[in-house]
Image (spheres, rainbow, N blue to C red):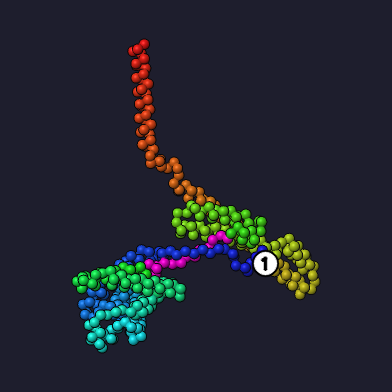
Amino acid sequence: MPTPTDPVPVRRVGRFALDPTDRDHLWKRQAGWVAGLMVASIVAVQTGVAFTLPELLMGCFGLAAVAAFPRKAPKVVAATAAMVGLSLALGPVTPGHSTLSSWLDVAAASGPVDLHATQYLAPAFLLGAALPYIDDGPADTIRSLNTGFVMATTVGVGVWAGFELVPTTWVTWAYTLCTGAILGLVSAQSLLVLALRYKTTDRIPTREVIADTLDETHRGPALVAWQLDHDLDELCPDADSRDGLGEVATWVYRLQWTRQHLASEVDKVGGPAVEERIVDLTERAEQAEDDFTRDRLMATVQHLQRLQGHREALTAEQARAAALSEFATAFLQEARAELTLARVQPGDASPDRLPEVLDRLRTYSADRALARQTRREVAAIAG
């Protein structure tokens, strides 16, 4: 059996789910992202600078991020500056054109402009990795890496779709607007990943673990909770309800774990032997003639009396844990019954073809009755 210092061996289950605070305004952020990128595309064309330059493209994404997170504009501006700086740094080491080369070489600026993938994928990854910090959400390393990779992927797909699917024969403003819209719609999906959270909840351990960690006295309620938790797997209508009921079942196991260790502590504290010691020491103190001996004996009695008080407190905690375990088990039983009643029962709705079948039966019955009546009338006339 485990000791009180050992961790409670509950199971941990996890799943990805939309954060409740982000669920309501996710579409607003995505709409702002798309609108910001479309506006930035039009502004880029109006300035007369090629939209395919990496620094300008990253600036457009910065404006889209400001539109999506207007209250976090200072953080977005800092992330945009880092993106543009990274694009400038990558310019001399990549075969693609950069803003600096366009300004220095007029022929290069007027000729065909090729955008190298590194010049926009790396800054896009940087922006995605900064999104958890911009959003003031959980900013752990794994989450930043995930948002960074998703942002780089969606930007790469968006750039390809925007520049390959929109005909270049269109009017400049229409071409730019459609390209920005496609790029915005695709890259805005990275905000969905930003709104995801990995939620972990406790679940009651398996029957084998329950049998190994609890004695026979405390094993029964935990096994009942395990069976109820197993039954609720097929009855729960949604994942959040399932997580809550799973935590209740786990609570029953924790309470039985606590009761078991409290029982072992109660056996070590107080009891009839301590009561006998208190009586014996009290009598010896009354009979003692030496003041020092009498004081030490009475001090010992006081310690033993406090020990008895601790035993009573531990016993009360045992009773409370047992009562809470009964309460939680009854709650699970009620939840299972309510969820069973909430499910669609066979008597709630008739088969779709039942009215048609009833009409046919009624028609057949009426035809047969009419035929019998006709036979009787013919027989009466002939007779």
**Residue 311 visible in the shown view:** no
* Secondary element at tag 1: helix
Residue 171 is left or right of residue 190, and the answer is left
Instruction: Single out the residue that lies furthest toward the left.
Output: 171
Query: Where residue 129 sits: x, y (%)?
Result: 40, 75
x then y, percent, for residue 42: 23, 74
Most extreme residue toward the bottom, as rendered? Answer: 104
Which amino acid type is shown beneath numbered disc 1? Answer: Arg
The span picked out in magenta is: 192-205
Q: Classify residue 221 by image quadrant.
A: bottom right
Q: Residue at 33% of width from left, 13% of height from top?
A: 381
Where residue 231 sits in the image (x, y, percent)?
53, 52
Residue at position x 27%, y 71% in the image: 179
Q: Which residue is mark 1?
A: 306
Magenta segment includes 204: yes
The residue at the point 75 percent across, 70 percent down is 297
Image quadrant containing the C terminus = top left
Q: Quadrant of residue 258?
A: bottom right
Give neighbour class at mark 1: few <14, some 14-19, many 20+ (Cα, 10 Å): few
Left or right? Give the position of 278 relative to 341: right
Query: Residue 187 in magenta?
Result: no
**What residue is at 21 percent from the left and 71 percent from the top?**
169
Front residue (pair 218, 352): 352
Q: Relative to residue 57, is residue 221 drawn left or right?
A: right
Please say if 117 is above or below 242.
below
Quarter location, residue 146: bottom left
Q: Is residue 276 left or right of residue 369?
A: right
In the displayed structure, 353 sits above or below 175; it is above
Residue 87 in percent (x, y) is at: 34, 82
